Amino acid sequence: MSLIASIIAQDPVGMKQLRAARTLALPDWCIAAGFVRNRVWDHLHGISPPRAPADIDMLYYDAADLSKETEQALEACLSALEPAPWQIRNQARMHIWKELPQHKSTADSMTYWLETVTAVGVRLEPDDSLTVIAPLGIDDLLGLRCCPTAYGRTRLHEYEARIASKGWRALWPKVQFA
């Protein structure tokens, strides 16, 4: 089991949320962003239990249904099952507001996020194993380095503003920011 999967597997709250998310049986799904990043960085900073993320980013990929209404219905369904600040997004439609070609998969869409450390997700498989989805790798996340993605380098002002607005430097002082 990878270190990331091990960190997530040791968190009963995170595992409960992953079990709830799995019940939706969405195609090409994972929970990503702060759900993973916060738990890993808290673990590497010796913070236990991990702090809850502001929201839980559940991703999936369904090119046959690009409606925002479906996402809202899924959020309501999941919130009824497991109350939490869910944010469910079909990655097949995320290209629209970024004015990009349609993404090919959930992993492909994550390459268009601003930071490499956020583009890491986990999925709870039917056999209860955890799959880590990290199209840009895990070295930055585990190495306590926050770097812009190739896409983020084209939007450095957004990358820097995001880091500042989230207060990551204060939350995780061991992290080096590029």
Image (spheres, rainbow, N blue to C red):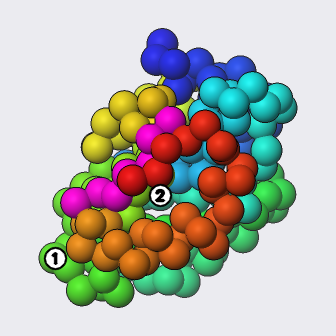
Tag 1 near tag 2, CB within 8 Å: no
Q: Residues within 10 Å of mark 1 (few under 14, many from 20)?
A: few
x then y, percent, for residue 34 = 60, 52
Vertical position of residue 3 compared to residue 131: above or below: above
Vertical position of residue 164 compared to residue 129: above or below: below
Residue ID for mark 2: 59
Q: Residues within 10 Å of mark 2 (few under 14, many from 20)?
A: many
Q: Is residue 154 left or right of residue 39?
A: left
x then y, percent, for residue 12 = 79, 29
Q: Amino acid at mark 1?
A: Pro
| Residue 177 visible in the snapshot | yes
Q: Amino acid at mark 2?
A: Leu
x then y, percent, for residue 155 = 31, 76
The one of 140 and 17 positioned closer to us in this rendering: 140
Q: Is residue 48 left or right of residue 115?
A: right
Q: Is residue 23 left or right of residue 61?
A: right
Q: Secondary structure at mark 1?
A: loop
Q: Find the distance from the CA under tag 1 to the CA under tag 2.
A: 18 Å
Q: Is residue 11 magenta?
A: no
Q: Write the start and end of the magenta stretch as one range.
A: 144-150
x then y, percent, for residue 118 = 47, 52
The one of 178 and 57 positioned closer to us in this rendering: 178
Q: Is residue 145 magenta?
A: yes
Q: Which mark is residue 101?
A: 1
The structure residue drawn at horizontal position 46% and vertical position 70%, both measured from the top left corner, is 160
Vertical position of residue 44 compared to residue 159: above or below: above
